[in-house]
Amino acid sequence: MTDHLAPHSIHVIGQPLLVPVTNIYCIGRNYAEHARELGNAVPTEPILFLKSVSSLRALGGGDLAYEDETFHHEAELVLLVGQVVPRGSSVGWEVLQAVGLGIDLTRREVQTQLKAQGLPWTAAKSFAGSSLLSAFIEPSELPDYNSITFTFSVHGQLRQQGDTALMLNSVPALLTHIAKAHDLVPGDLVFTGTPAGVGPLRRGDAFTLEFTQIAKSFSGRL
Ligand code: ZN
């Protein structure tokens, strides 16, 4: 899919229709080792924030705000909700239409300043091109939901390794937590938090995201 075809829609491999994105929920500090590398406390319940739908972009280059800055990459498993989930429901994998890999691109210095002032993270997290998405796959393609592994490499060098087994809050726990306060609807995305290894990413850097168990990789360029 090209960036200009439908930048705010998801392509699920093997499914004919693009899925328009509704909301983008993001989880902070869902891996203990990542919380520690930024000097943050390990939270007792999920930290939830939002990004704008207009921040979405495919991996292959394109519009990017603040393009002269050095960002931090946060490689993450991303969930695509496929059905209505009424508020208050306890839910899990059965409500997902697809899963993908994404980068929650972050202006880390700005975020650090905002955090110090007790202000929302929005200016550090939500801007054109800050939510990068692979194509998505049907969850049934993955062998074991309890240990989905993925990697993120820049210029061929491994930077991050994720594993749902290491998440502080599991995928069902995250979905149920968000659904405590929101009706989930088709097209909702959930960025599930980044593992340790966040680091610099600049315009033009070439990178690869991979579901390692099924050797499915997605290459892109900032
Ligand atoms: Zn993130």
Image (spheres, helix red, strand yellow):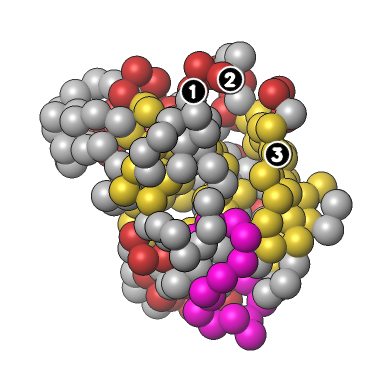
Mark 3 or 1, nearer chain start? 1
For label 1, count other residues whose C-alpha is less than 10 Å away and answer few (under 14), some (14-19) or many (20+).
some
Q: Which mark is residue 139?
A: 1
In the picture, the quarter occupied by the C terminus is bottom right
The three-letter code of the residue at mark 3 reads Ser
Residue closest to the eye, 78 or 174: 78
- Residue 163 included in the magenta stretch of the image: no
Counting residues from the N terminus, which is met first, the one under dot 3 or under dot 2?
Answer: 2
Q: Position of residue 71 (x, y in %)?
A: 62, 71
Residue at the location (50% across, 79% down)? 65
Look at the magenta stretch and give its main secondary structure: loop
The Cα atoms of the two marked residues, 3 and 2, are separated by 13 Å
Residue 174 rendering spot, x and y as whole percentages: 37, 33
Q: Nearer the viewer, residue 6 or 209?
A: 6
Residue shown at 30%/31% (left/top)? 82
Q: Secondary structure at mark 2?
A: loop
Q: Is the residue under label 2 in contact with that under label 3 (CB below 8 Å)?
A: no
Foreground residue, 1 or 88? 1
The kind of residue tagged 2 is Leu
Q: Which mark is residue 217?
A: 3
Name which residue lies at 61% across and 14% down.
Answer: 143
Q: Position of residue 205 (x, y in %)?
A: 75, 67
Tag 2 residue: 142
Using the image, determine if residue 71 lies above or below residue 153: below
As helix, strand or loop, the secondary structure at mark 3 comes to strand
Looking at the rendering, the stretch of residues picked out in magenta corresponds to 56-71
Mark 2 and mark 1: Cα distance apart in space: 6 Å
**Residue 142 in view:** yes
Count of numbered badges drawn on the protein: 3
Q: Are marks 2 and 1 in contact (CB under 8 Å)?
A: yes
